[in-house]
Image (tube, helix red, strand yellow):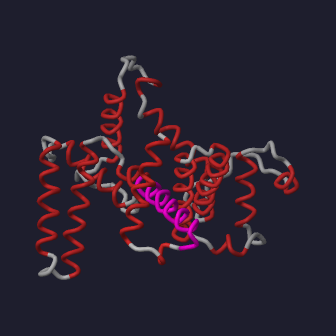
Amino acid sequence: MPKRLLPRIESDSLVHDEAAGIERLLEIMARLRAPDGCPWDREQSFATIAPYTLEEAYEVADAIARKDWGELRGELGDLLFQVVYHAQLAEDAGLFGFEDVARAASDKMVARHPHVFGDESDARDAVQQTAEWERLKAAERGAARTLEGVALALPALTRAIKLQNRAARVGFDWPSTAEVVDKIVEEARELVEARESLSEAEITEEFGDLIFVIANLARHLRIDPESALRTANAKFARRFGRIEDWLAETGRRPADSDLAEMDALWDRAKAEERGAG
């Protein structure tokens, strides 16, 4: 089993020493997983903790999107704790420890930035650095197949972009944005025309194809589709909230209204936002 390189902290320090930093956090995690630790924490595994890790990552992204820097500090701490948790699970299983995780990250960053840490001194712009980053990642993977290694657990839109980027690097891509738009129109028309004759599974598959092409349009436009959809979701919720506010002024709820009235209120909400902008 990997040996802990950091000095062990006495139990009293776990509660009171706020200056201990990462050492304190590591020891708290070890204590939770100890034979006399927390029963819930002792029962967990990589698989049961993984959903919490994803949730914490999303909460970090949410705090950034809202520019809530005070909350971001806490959310980053929660995400760090997830890394510590997985590292402790690995140490308990005799696989590796937190120090190994930190060392691997440091080694990777140094290897992928030869223009900073190595002998290469040429200045590169962001596009050149991204291309070199991807080249080094591919060399590290040593994958025989182009699409190998794109994580299955990624959000579907994000994974679509990564798959498409991989394929584009070997020349499998539409030459222009206009051709992507034409394909979107074609896929949408086919889905609408065939919806009466297709099974539910086939309709779902065709709809997936349409979303995949829309993701490709986002890639050609250099837009993050996940971020764009989050913005659209927030806009919808904000404007619908205004509809509810205005209806409430007359003692009513959306269920007491009709589509024509709510559509007019939606346009009012849009105009209000544009005026504020």
Seen from the viewer's position, the closer of residues 136 and 58 is 58
The location of residue 70, given as percent across then percent down, is 67, 45
Point out residue 30 in the picture as x, y percentages from the top left corner.
71, 60
Image check: 230 left or right of 145? right
Q: Quadrant of the image for the N terminus?
A: bottom right
Image coords of residue 72 (percent x, y): 62, 47
Please give left or right for residue 39 compared with residue 108 in the image.
Answer: right
Q: Does residue 265 appear left or right of residue 222 in this picture?
A: right
User: Residue shown at 14%/57% (left/top)?
Assistant: 185
- Which residue corresponds to the image point at 68% horizontal and 74% vertical from the top-left? 40
- Based on the displayed image, in which of its 4 quarters is residue 191 positioned? bottom left
Exactly how many numbered labels are in the figure? 0
Q: Is residue 137 above or below residue 10?
A: above
**Does 68 appear above or below 150?**
above
Q: Residue at x 47, y 56 (%)?
A: 234
Residue 156, by quadrant, is bottom left
Whether 249 is among the magenta residues is: yes
Instruction: Identify whether 150 is placed above or below 220.
Output: below
User: Which quadrant of the view contains residue 84?
Assistant: bottom right
Residue at 74 percent of width and 55 percent of height: 27
- Residue furthest to the front in view is 250
Left or right: where 85 falls relative to 134: right
User: Residue 142 appears at what percent x and percent y?
Assistant: 30, 47
- State which region is magenta: 232-252
**Residue 32 versus residue 225: which sits nearer the camera?**
225
Q: Any magenta on residue 38?
A: no
Tell me the chief SS of the magenta region.
helix
